[in-house]
Image (cartoon, helix red, strand yellow):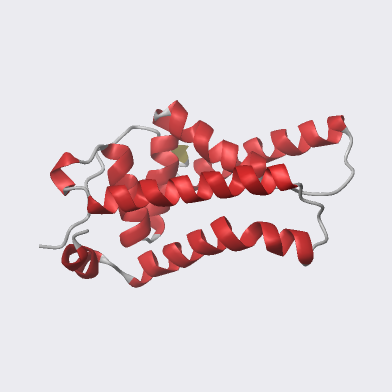
Amino acid sequence: MNLTVIKQDLTFYGIINIILYMLGSFILLPLLHYYFKINISLLNYIIWYIWSIGYTFYVLYILNKQPDKRNNIENVTYNWFIKGGLSSYQDVFLISEKEPFYEYAILGVLILIPVANKMTIRRKVEVILLKVALFHITASLLLMDWTNLVVNYEFREVESKVDK
């Protein structure tokens, strides 16, 4: 891993995003289970941690990859973990609007987060649809051009933000 480049690029907001990722990936389910008393099945734990560990290895692969060999999704991921800030969140939502599989992956993670015990099937479907709606509302608010009040989904090339 090219640690000197990462050390040079790493910002305070990137550290915040790394901490948020670690908390969300590895602490969220036990917190929901023990603190909020949500019954989480062993299968849910297994799926969540396989996803989290797999994505962690993917991120480590991206961090190790040369900047000129990264695609837009990899640049967005690199910038989210290393640079952070509002623009990194905007880039995540922008690329999710243009790359359906990326959006499905994000929505899959949101859907996997358990919300309550003993819900009817209808209520579970409503909660899933609510999560999808909140995702898209958040995306439109973050991507809003507030001077014109228009959401700009026009894709821009996202480069790794390397300070030279």
Quadrant into which the N terminus falls: bottom left
Q: Quadrant of residue 84?
A: bottom left
Q: Is residue 19 above or below residue 62?
A: below
Residue 65 placement (x, y as % from top left): 21, 48
Q: Quadrant of residue 35?
A: bottom right
Q: Is residue 148 above or below residue 13?
A: above
Q: Is residue 81 above or below residue 108?
A: below
Comparing 34 with 86, the one in front is 34
Residue 108 placement (x, y as % from top left): 58, 37
Query: Would residue 76 be found to the left or right of residue 108 on screen?
Result: left
- Residue, far bottom: 12
Residue at image coords 77%, 31%: 125
Comparing 132 with 151, the one in front is 132
Residue 93 placement (x, y as % from top left): 45, 42
Quadrant into which the C terminus falls: bottom left
- Residue, far top: 100
Residue at image coords 38%, 37%: 95
Residue 147 placement (x, y as % from top left): 41, 48
Residue at image coords 71%, 33%: 129
- Note whether residue 29 is visible: yes
